[in-house]
Image: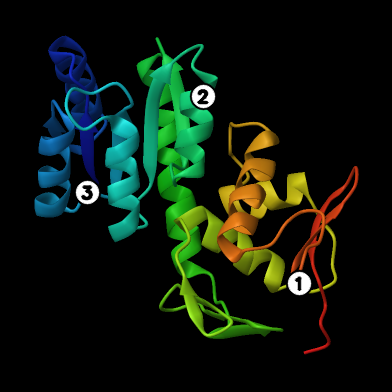
Amino acid sequence: MTRVLLVDDEENLRHALGYALRQEGYDVITAEDGRRALAQFRAARPDVVILDVMLPGIDGLEVCRRIRRESDVPILLLTARDSEVDRIVGLEIGADDHIGKPFSTRELVARIRALLRRARRAAQVDEPAQLRASGLVVDTPKRRVIRDDAEVRLTAKEFDLLVFLMSRPGVVATREQLLAGVWGQDWAGDMRTVDTHVRTLRQALGESADRPRWIETVRGVGYRFRDHGE
């Protein structure tokens, strides 16, 4: 049975969503604050996390950041409908999707199913064990990135984005292709998600858009990984 960790400080919402998700066949565990959420995550190892941004104590963004250091589990953020900052920051630190309050149970279930499908597809992809470019080595099974002999820490989506581009050196990938390849065909977000993750990926790799060492912007189209002839 698929296990869902539902984190929200509103008791009525936890009960209502928990009941609805159990009716859909999910095993639901809940937490009312950030500290409890981290404890439940480590004890129960859920298959997907539904995480409210506004939590007492440790807020949802920090919980997301800490979970992402330990796991690639799909994370769905619950945000205020007009909180663009929370949505962008959440994606930058590793959330996979977001949904604005208020929302319907049907939409929430659809988002969860989409996240789980993408996670299953990602686990089944037959990737090369190692990718190499000038000064860059990616170990795909261990999900490690080495830049100039030093390890680089990436979020799950930054890693997937790098592998997608690096697997196709010299080939321009449109934003639509990147969304489909990294986030999945049923991704419900917008194109800015790609640009946000490319920006944070470049920062992690220590390069700039003006003088890219690896990831080039193709204006009006998308991005490509530079072919260093290796």
Position of the C terminus, as image quadrant, is bottom right
Discs 2/3, front: 2
Between 54 and 190, the one lying in front of the other is 54
Q: Between 150 and 102, which is closer to the camera in this rendering?
A: 150
Residue found at x 30% / y 39%: 62
Q: Is residue 221 left or right of residue 33?
A: right
Q: Is residue 149 above or below residue 114?
A: below
Q: Residues within 10 Å of mark 2 (few under 14, many from 20)?
A: few
Q: Is residue 189 above or below residue 17?
A: below
Tell me the CA gap for discs 2 and 3.
27 Å
Give the labeled residue for mark 3.
46
Q: Which residue is mark 2?
A: 85
Q: Residues within 10 Å of mark 3 (few under 14, many from 20)?
A: some
What residue would you read off at disc 1? 168
The three-letter amino acid code for the residue at tag 2 is Val
User: Where does residue 221 sit, x and y in percent of width and height?
Assistant: 88, 47
Q: Residue at x 61, y 68 (%)?
A: 163
Q: Is residue 225 above or below residue 97?
A: below
Bin the neighbour count of mark 1 within 10 Å (Cα to Cα): few under 14, some 14-19, many 20 and up.
Answer: some
Give the x, y percent position of residue 44: 12, 50
Amino acid type, label 1: Arg
Cβ atoms under marks 2 and 3 closer than 8 Å: no
